[in-house]
Image (spheres, rainbow, N blue to C red):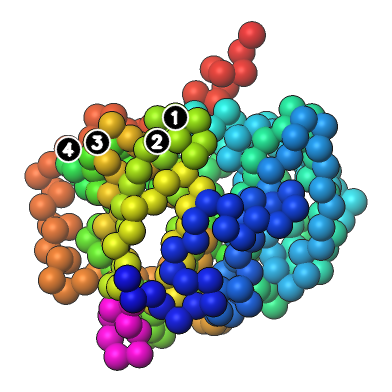
Amino acid sequence: MNAAPTKLGSVVRDGETADGAFSLVITPAAAGWGYSSLRVLELPAGGSVTFPTGEDEMVVLPLSGGCTVECDGERFALAGRGSVFSRVTDFAYVPRDGEVTVSSAAGGRFALPGARATRRLPARYGPAEGVQVEMRGAGQASRQVNNFCTPEAFDADKLIAVEVLTPGANWSSYPPHKHDEEREGEACLEEIYYFEISGGPRPGPGVGYQRVSTSGPGREIDVCAEVRSGDTVLIPYGWHGPSMAAPGYDLYYLNVMAGPSPERAWLICDHPDHAWVRGTWDDQEVDPRLPLTTTQEQMQEEEP
């Protein structure tokens, strides 16, 4: 594999960047780029961690378990979820130049997608019921997208983040696309893919696959990687997709994006060899297994 010239390399394996309570730490400096970041915090029952946000705005997103988030005199109780495959979760936004405390009575794992920010916005709570759940694609390209922090769904300075759930044997992030140039219809965005796979205890036996390829001179990258729960793929540029769910294993990934454009916009360009695939979806049904998670499931799980 000829990896992109990031300091960490294009594929970061589970635990490779662990630091204290954080099982994953990807900063702009570590990735060798300017904006996107991701941390995963693991807390035992009764655990609590306080940390500064520095120059980054962040979202506290439960992967498993619930927590309390305190920042700027605000206190948000996040109900969370059993796992990324059990329901859509609520979340909290915390601004740059802040001090954040995350506490969990029962313990859990919490993703902290972030972006280097120029504006300081107020800390806020994001209810699960406010997350737009989108069914994208059709047939074996069907997938679910939880748009919890897109420009249309939630106000932030630079951060764009979504969750994607792909049923076993389906492809997502397809057709391959890119967002590595500032031009009409396309924005320059660094992207992080964080993966979890259904089918067993973490890291579990399940596997998925991710493809990233060169999009032009100076943007050389060649990744075709098997990924397991806790693995991460860094995409500074290039055509990315498909993300492939192996038969029998549903695939989850958290996308984190940010870039230098003054406009916070998620604008992509499809690979010209494969863009025609979108036109075939009009005659296909969305995979009946979708949605894999909903906010209604959350309320049912909490009933005694």
The amino acid beneath tag 1 is Gly
* Magenta-highlighted residues: 214-221
Disc sitting over residue 285 in the figure: 4
Sooner in the amino-acid sequence: mark 2 or mark 4? 2
| Residue 148 image point, x, y percent | 53, 49
Q: Residues within 10 Å of mark 2 (few under 14, many from 20)?
A: few
Asked which secondary structure carries label 2, the reply is loop
Q: Which residue is mark 3?
A: 247
Front one among 246 and 278: 246
Asked which secondary structure carries label 3, the reply is loop
Q: Please state, as top left, top right, bottom left or bottom right, where the N terminus lies in the image.
A: bottom left
- Residue at 54% of width from left, 32% of height from top? 83
Disc sitting over residue 7 in the figure: none
Sooner in the amino-acid sequence: mark 2 or mark 3? 2
In space, the residues marked 4 and 1 are separated at their CA atoms by 29 Å
In space, the residues marked 3 and 1 are separated at their CA atoms by 14 Å
Q: Which residue is mark 2?
A: 205
- 68 vs 2: above or below: above
